Amino acid sequence: MGFFDDISKKVSETTSSINEKTNKMAKESKLKKTLSENDTKVEKMYGELGKTVLAKRNNKDDVMKAINDCVDKIEEIKNENEKIREEILLLNNKKKCTNCSAEIDAQAAFCPECGKEQIKVEPKKEEPEEEKIPEGKMKCSGCGEIIETKYTFCPLCGAKNEPPAVEGEVVDNK
């Protein structure tokens, strides 16, 4: 049975890894789409600004107000885009150097381009999902592997186990 358990475990790990990568790619694609949409908005705003200035060229106060309003909106979008770019870098375990803006590993203590010491960035850790224990099985209190409830002792690590009060209970994977 151990051989099939090993295969099952490897398949489960591979599936989990593929799901994580797929979710990361989907999130990155969504962020890149937002960046593109924001860039399109800014380009439209530049065009609208030119039209507004031309239409209000005789009233300098109206022109300046229109320019300031438009510039404020453009800056807001550009700031949002910068945050999105940082989030994309973090998804890829990267960050920008605080000195030269080179793209570097998120855990780098020093920039390999300019040598400047970096602020430590903690990688985003996703909360572990709750694990559904199949009926007739339990999680070993010693090694954490899923074993049959009929076992008093884990066949993998030898730890003594008590069967769960309710079969099929949901346990936290922490």
Image (cartoon, helix red, strand yellow):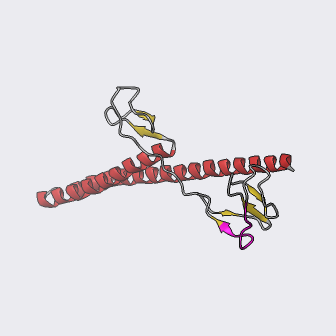
- Is residue 81 in view? yes
Magenta region, main secondary structure: loop
Residue at the location (54% across, 53% down)?
27
Q: Nearer the viewer, residue 155 or 59?
A: 155
- Say if residue 55 shows up in the picture: no
Identify whether 121 is placed above or below 108: below
Is 42 on the left or on the right of 53, as rendered? right
Residue placed at 51% from the left, 42% from the top?
92
- Residue 110 higher or lower than 164, as above or below: above
Q: Quadrant of the C terminus?
A: bottom right
Query: Relative to residue 42, is residue 24 drawn left or right?
Result: right
Q: Which residue is depicted at the point 54% across and 54% down?
A: 126
Which portion, as a residue range, is magenta? Answer: 161-170
- Residue 96 or 2: which is nearer the viewer? 2
Residue 43, compared with residue 98, is above or below; it is below
Q: Position of residue 105 (x, y in %)?
A: 46, 35
Q: Is residue 88 above or below residue 149?
A: above
- Residue farthest to the bottom? 166
Of 155 and 86, which appears nearest the observer? 155
Residue 19 image offset from top left, x and y in percent: 65, 52
Q: How many marks?
A: 0
At which x and y percent is residue 83?
A: 38, 50
The magenta stretch spans residue 164: yes
163 part of magenta stretch: yes
Residue closest to the far right: 1
Where's residue 101, x and y in %? 36, 35
Residue 52 or residue 166, whichever sits in front: 166
